[in-house]
Image (cartoon, rainbow, N blue to C red):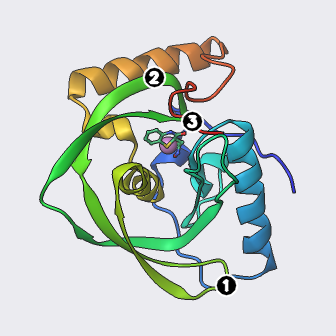
Amino acid sequence: MALRPIICIPDPLLRVHCEPVLKIDEEIRVLMDDMLETMYEAPGIGLAAIQIAIPKRVVVMDLAKADHPPEPRVFVNPEIIWSSPETRIYEEGCLSIPDYYEEVERPSRVCVRYLDREGLTQELEADGLLATCLQHEIDHLNGVLFIDHLSRLKRERVIKKYTKAAKLNEPIAPSGPRTRDRIR
Ligand code: GNR
Ligand code: NI
């Protein structure tokens, strides 16, 4: 297992459309394990492969509460096959936009089809934080960030701040999303 550096905006890699995984082989299993380790260390509740600069459609997640056993999940080639007409608003953060949080409105429930660790097709109907997080991560696979769901003013303000900081080589935050979202 290995920790891999997480890339941040304005890195253009965060805007690429990621490639489907054709075969779940040892290389992909190593990637999943490295992503989980990197996510736990950040700490975050989800991570898309592109956040460690790998343009493949792989997502990891763990929504288990801090005092509960870990529940690592992996989703390969996840697709939203149904979204509820009802929406919910949740305050999101992103490890690639450290220290910035804003409310995002998304469908409150989704049905997702994906391949599991063994390469078997699975379908999952999700609500609550799982539904929000799945949509946040699937957006990453398509080069979309949660700030793209905000007003243009808010989005441009954030991008400008991080672009300036990157030019001056100033780290914006040493750690990941604040403890409220952190579960472990
Ligand atoms: O750790 C994370 N917390 C979070 C909180 C609300 C909605 C989405 C997320 S995902 C984020 C980790 C991350 O950036 N995944 O891409
Ligand atoms: Ni994110």
Q: Is mark 2 within 8 Å of ligand 1?
A: no
Mark 3: which secondary structure?
loop
Q: Which residue is mark 1?
A: 118
The residue shown at (60%, 64%) is 73
Q: Is mark 3 within 8 Å of ligand 1?
A: yes
Q: Which residue is mark 3?
A: 95
The disc label shown at residue 100, or none: 2
Mark 2: which secondary structure?
strand
Mark 1: which secondary structure?
loop
Label 2 crowd bin: few (<14), some (14–19), many (20+), radius 10 Å:
some
Work out which quarter of the rendered image holds the N terminus and state it.
bottom right
Label 3 crowd bin: few (<14), some (14–19), many (20+), radius 10 Å:
many
Q: CA distance from mark 2 to mark 3?
A: 9 Å
Image position of 129 with respect to 149: above or below: below
Amino acid type at image mark 2: Tyr
Position in image of residue 133 (x %, y %): 43, 51
Sequence order check, earlier mark of 2 and 3: 3
Work out which quarter of the rendered image holds the C terminus and state it.
top right
Q: CA distance from mark 1 to mark 2?
A: 35 Å
As drawn, is 168 to the left or to the right of 86?
right
Position in image of residue 155 (x %, y %): 31, 27
Name, please, the residue furthest toward the front. Answer: 67
